[in-house]
Amino acid sequence: MKEYIFKQYLDNILKHMDISIEDFFEKSKKNTSVIPRQILYYMCYEKGMGVYDIESYIDKLGYKATHPTILHGIKKAEEILENDTDYMYIVKKLEKIEL
């Protein structure tokens, strides 16, 4: 069930940000890739997924994200959401999933 939610969140972010999955997981420091990934990590973590689970779901898609990277991303997303209320609105919108 949690993996389905992960995939829905990922799909919502990709559509909203209008980026491909390849660009999303690109090893880049560009905010167009980094912030969406951090938001995904945050959303999943807030939904009760463990860091190991998030890491394994990403691995199943053929990409890599290490435990420390995911933890750092969650922390950075929290900082973004504290400082920019527009992102909080976007996250609330992205959390809607279809069953």
Image (cartoon, rainbow, N blue to C red):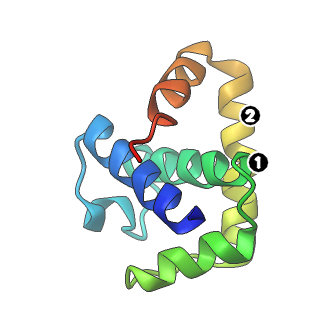
Q: Check contact, mark 1 vs mark 2: CB within 8 A.
A: yes
Q: Residue at x 42, y 70 (%)?
A: 27
Depicted 98 relative to depicted 37: above or below: above
Decide: few, some or many residues near mark 1? Use Cα within 10 Å; few <14, some 14-19, many ≥20. some
37 sits to left or right of 82: left
Depicted 2 relative to depicted 19: above or below: below
Please identify the quarter of the rendering in which residue 51 is found. bottom right
> Dot 1 lies on which element?
helix
Please identify the quarter of the rendering in which residue 70 is found. bottom right
Residue 13 x, y percent position in the rendering:
38, 44
Q: Mark 2 points at which residue?
A: 79
Give how far apart the Cα atoms at labels 1 and 2 are. Answer: 6 Å
Looking at the rendered structure, the kind of residue marked 1 is Lys
Res 75 label: 1
Residue 84 x, y percent position in the rendering:
62, 18
Q: Which residue is drawn at 65% across and 31% down?
A: 80
Q: Which residue is drawn at 38% across and 85% down?
A: 62
Residue 44 x, y percent position in the rendering:
63, 53
The extreme front residue here reads 99
Depicted 37 relative to depicted 89: above or below: below
Residue 96 x, y percent position in the rendering:
47, 34
Looking at the rendered structure, the kind of residue marked 2 is Glu
The extreme top residue here reads 85
